[in-house]
Amino acid sequence: MSGAATVAIVMGSQSDWPTMKCTADVLEELGIAHEARIVSAHRTPDRMYDFAKGAADEGFKVVIAGAGGAAHLPGMIAAMTPLPVLGVPVQSKALSGMDSLLSIAQMPAGIPVGTLAIGEAGATNAALLAAAILGAHDPAVMERLVAWRAARTAKVAERPE
Ligand code: RP5
């Protein structure tokens, strides 16, 4: 995708990529420039700090953060940037992502993380929500989002076959 990235997709591990690729794929379809990085709250805390502190200056408008298990990455990033942060709970092996979901959703008042569904549905919807956020100030993005949704609607059969 050409142009300066407006959406940052960050994830705690390479193992999150199959899930977070759904976000990248939808942003690609919507023509929204994005960049994906591995930024772990517990394995690379300095990288996380540098990313979160510098995200706005880098030109990002929305951060989408995916993590699994004790998924503190979205909340930690949200604590260090005024940008909207959308959290995707990655499906964990031990608890099927319930741990990820609760870690991301249950932020104390004052530091919000927009929490999506567990797994690929959440990753897909994070891209659509980012598009809606950007589209509020970018009519071209909103037009592409409306067209994307209309195309999905058009594919729904009236009767099962
Ligand atoms: C988290 O731990 C990551 O977000 C990932 O979902 C989970 C497991 O990571 P790996 O052990 O697969 O690297 O940090």
Image (tube, grey):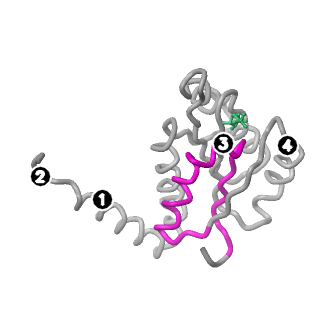
| Residue 33 location, quadrant | bottom right
Check whether the beta carbons of the residues at disc 4 and disc 2 lie within 8 A of each other: no
Which secondary structure, mark 3? Answer: helix
Which secondary structure, mark 2? Answer: loop
- When the figure is inspected, residue 132 is found, relative to residue 75, above or below; the finding is below
Answer with mark 4 or mark 2, whichever residue precedes in sequence.
4
The span picked out in magenta is 4-33
| Residue 157 in the image, given as x and y percentages of width and height | 16, 54
The three-letter amino acid code for the residue at tag 3 is Ser
| Residue 4 in the image, given as x and y percentages of width and height | 68, 74
Answer with mark 1 or mark 3, whichever residue precedes in sequence.
3
The reply to whether the residue tagged 3 has its Cβ within 8 angstroms of ligand 1 is yes
| Residue 84 in the image, given as x and y percentages of width and height | 64, 51
Q: CA distance from mark 3 to mark 4?
A: 15 Å
The reply to whether the residue tagged 2 has its Cβ within 8 angstroms of ligand 1 is no
* Label number found at residue 15: 3
Q: CA distance from mark 1 to mark 2?
A: 13 Å
Which secondary structure, mark 4? Answer: loop
The three-letter amino acid code for the residue at tag 2 is Glu
Q: CA distance from mark 1 to mark 3?
A: 29 Å
> What residue would you read off at disc 2?
158
Which corner quadrant holds the N terminus? bottom right
* Label number found at residue 152: 1
- When the figure is inspected, residue 149 is found, relative to residue 78, above or below; the finding is below
The three-letter amino acid code for the residue at tag 1 is Arg
> What residue would you read off at disc 4?
44
Q: CA distance from mark 4 to mark 2?
A: 50 Å
